[in-house]
Image (cartoon, helix red, strand yellow):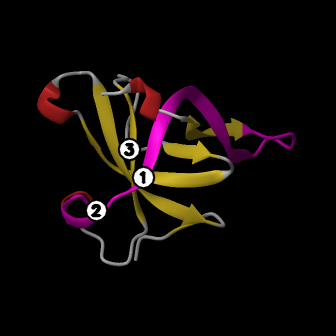
Amino acid sequence: MNPGTLDRKVQFIRYQDVDNEVGADSQKPVVIFSTWARIEPARGREYYEAQRVKDANPFKITIRYHTNVDDSMTIEYHQQQYDIQTITDPYMAHEVLEIYCTQKTRGVSHVG
């Protein structure tokens, strides 16, 4: 992997229950970690194998290998959010993670 291609600073977010000022539970986004990534549209075979969703707006986000990534997280880049669909460790080499996502718009996922 060419580390120079990781040119976008992204945040991995998980929504957690917190008590608000009146004592009720609410969901709050919590940044788990930030890292450099490459963001690109998933095309062709990648689209059909990873997404299997016809009407989705699919993206592939590549980061250095990290053990704390799971599909309950959301990725944020410049106030744009991406829902994680699939996470792969190519060749199980523990060098990079390829994360296949769908783009969210106004809090609603593009998954059809």
**Label 1 vs label 2, nearer the camera:** 1
Q: Give the dominant element type of the magenta stretch: helix, strand or loop.
A: strand
Answer with left or right where residue 21 lies relative to residue 110. Answer: right
Q: Residue furthest right?
A: 21
**Label 3 vs label 1, nearer the camera:** 1
Percent across and percent down for residue 58 are 39, 62
Measured Cα–Cα span from mark 3 to mark 2: 13 Å
Question: Residue under circle 2?
Answer: 51
Range of magenta residues: 19-48
Percent across and percent down for residue 26 are 70, 47
Measured Cα–Cα span from mark 3 to mark 1: 18 Å
Q: Residue furthest left?
A: 91
Residue 42 forms part of the magenta stretch: yes
Which is nearer the N-term, disc 1 or disc 2? 1
Residue type of the residue flagged with mark 3:
Asp
What is the crowding at mark 3: few (fewer than 14 residues within 10 Å), some, or many (at least 20)? some
Out of 1 and 83, give the one closest to the viewer. Answer: 1
Question: Residue under circle 3?
Answer: 71
Residue type of the residue flagged with mark 1:
Glu
Task: Give the numbered dot on residue 10.
Answer: none
Please tell me whether mark 2 sits on a helix, a strand or a loop.
helix
